[in-house]
Image (spheres, helix red, strand yellow):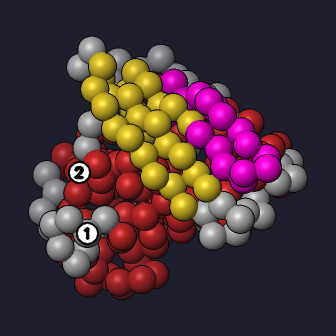
Amino acid sequence: MAFYGRWPGWFQPLLYIVPRRPLLMRDSIKGASIVPTLKFLKEKFGKEGLDKVMGPLSEASRTELQHLSTSQWYSLECFVELLKAIQTQLGKGLDDMDILRETGRYASTEGLMWMNWLYLKVQDPFSLAEKYSLLWSSFYNSGTFDLLEMDREGKKVRFRLSGFKVKDRQFYERLSGWIEGAIATAGGKSPKVTYDLKLEGGKAVCELLCVFE
């Protein structure tokens, strides 16, 4: 029986009280970051939509996604493959990324409530921005996420992700949605993220600007 990452509600606060950044040979993502994506698909599109996304995936990716543990680490390639399938199977076209932004916003809203209660204690979008590198290392074992700019008067924050393997736009659209949802959860109104993705030394470097009201 496939559970696709289901977990008991009372257990959610414990998902983040685990060691971060394990020394893994492969680039990995925490199961707790994948689970909300699958939950979003089930809530918005039902079992039929979820199965539609799972169908084109490789057997290895389907196996990982059917046996998720929120506290364990999984292949980053599997997650990117999932995002690509979401876009092609449920999006409105090959260039339509809105579904991935929506997925990211849902995931951040779902996760930050518990993380804030546990240890973040953010008061506004800027205090959240200051802790985003901590959030990144909680979910990814590679890449460096830095805060470049924080403009309180202009209500904008700028981040830089470097040394990261993933070059696919689908990932950065989902990440942009995650930041939008996080800023909104922290009190920012109408957040919008734009990004500039480049390659340096064979790895991705992405600057992300979030403007809000």
Residue plotted at (14% across, 52% down): 59
Q: Is residue 74 visible?
A: no
Quadrant, the N terminus: bottom left
Q: Is residue 168 visible?
A: yes
Q: Quadrant of residue 92?
A: bottom left
The Cα atoms of the two marked residues, 1 and 2, are separated by 16 Å
Q: Is residue 119 above or below residue 200?
A: below
Residue plotted at (44% across, 25% down): 162
Q: Which residues are magenta?
A: 140-158
Q: Earlier in the sequence, mark 1 or mark 2?
A: 2
Q: Tell me if residue 32 is in the magenta stretch.
A: no
Amino acid type at circle 1 is: Asp
Q: Is residue 122 left or right of residue 101?
A: right
Residue tagged 2: 81
Q: Secondary structure at mark 1?
A: loop
Q: Quadrant of residue 106?
A: bottom right
Q: Is residue 205 above or below residue 43?
A: above
Q: Is residue 10 left or right of residue 3?
A: right
Residue tagged 1: 96
Q: At which x and y percent is residue 5? A: 45, 61
Amino acid type at circle 2 is: Glu
Q: Is residue 90 left or right of residue 99?
A: left
Residue plotted at (36% across, 71% down): 99
Q: At which x and y percent is residue 122? A: 83, 49
Q: At which x and y percent is residue 180? A: 57, 59
Quadrant, the C terminus: bottom right
Residue plotted at (35% across, 48% down): 171
